[in-house]
Amino acid sequence: MAGDVPPSLRAFFAEADAPNRSLALVNRKEPEAVQRLLESAFAGQSVSVAERQFPEEGDDVVLVIEDTDVVATSPLDEVMNAFLLVNSDLYKTGTSGLEDGGAPSVLTALADVVFDLRGYPASNKEKLLLILMSRYIERLALSSGGGRLRSTFQRLSRIEDERGTREVYRKLAESGVDVHVYGQPGWRPDESLDLTVHTGTSDDYRHSWCVAYTPQGGDGTYAALVAVETAPNEWRGMWTYDRDRVTRVDRYLDERL
């Protein structure tokens, strides 16, 4: 129900109401292996992938099709450079996605779709979707220079251990964004890092992956990623820009963690 905080993070998945969406690789000139990479990245998900020929479109374009309407477009090379041809180390060791072009539109447009995603070595690409969208929401917060960001890390020490994550949250702490970080105890930021730290050992602390941004004064883009670890290195997750849903994710993290 609108405004209510659900009993668990998993309950947000039951609310997912995404329309039927598919990805189309249009007028491909790149090798067939690229098409196979895109298909394998979404294998087993509700988002299907097909190769199409559309004379009115340019070459090597990826589309999101909702029913029969095109709702997002990205050049294939953008999808390759941000997703298909990289691994998570690009984001863990650097600030990719924060200072460059960010996540491709065809990926950010897959809002309110529930994904079941595996990390390495089971999959090289699936979990990268969550990393990309986390960085996208962090970038949104940083570009606004205000508002509130809540992020769960399972282990707070990841902020220190992952050079890219540390740099992203240093920039956020200096930006005027009210940043709250959540995780199991064992690490505290030094005084120069203006973060509000929340620690605990409950299931949500140990097995959640959330990034929720609420803009200052309610003006701007609301965005949240919610993911729950369902087995070792396997995640069920989604992202949303629905204002009510993001507000409720923010409230859940504030009240339950």
Image: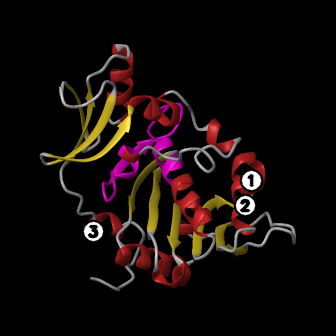
Q: Earlier in the sequence, mark 3 or mark 1?
A: 3
Residue for badge 2: 171
Q: Quadrant of the N terminus?
A: bottom left
Where is residue 175 drawn, in percent x and y? Answer: 70, 69
Amino acid under label 2?
Answer: Lys
As drawn, the residue found furthest toward the left would be 68
Q: Which mark is residue 207?
A: none
Compared across the picture, whether 50 is left or right of 257 comes to left
Question: What segment is highlighted magenta in the picture?
Answer: 106-133
Residue at image point 81% right, 66% down: 189
Compared across the picture, whether 256 is left or right of 179 comes to left
Where is residue 217 drawn, in percent x and y? Answer: 51, 85
Q: Quadrant of residue 139?
A: bottom right
Residue for badge 1: 167
Q: Which mark is residue 15?
A: 3
Q: Is residue 97 above or below residue 228?
A: above
The stretch drawn in magenta includes residue 115: yes
As drawn, the residue found furthest toward the right would be 191
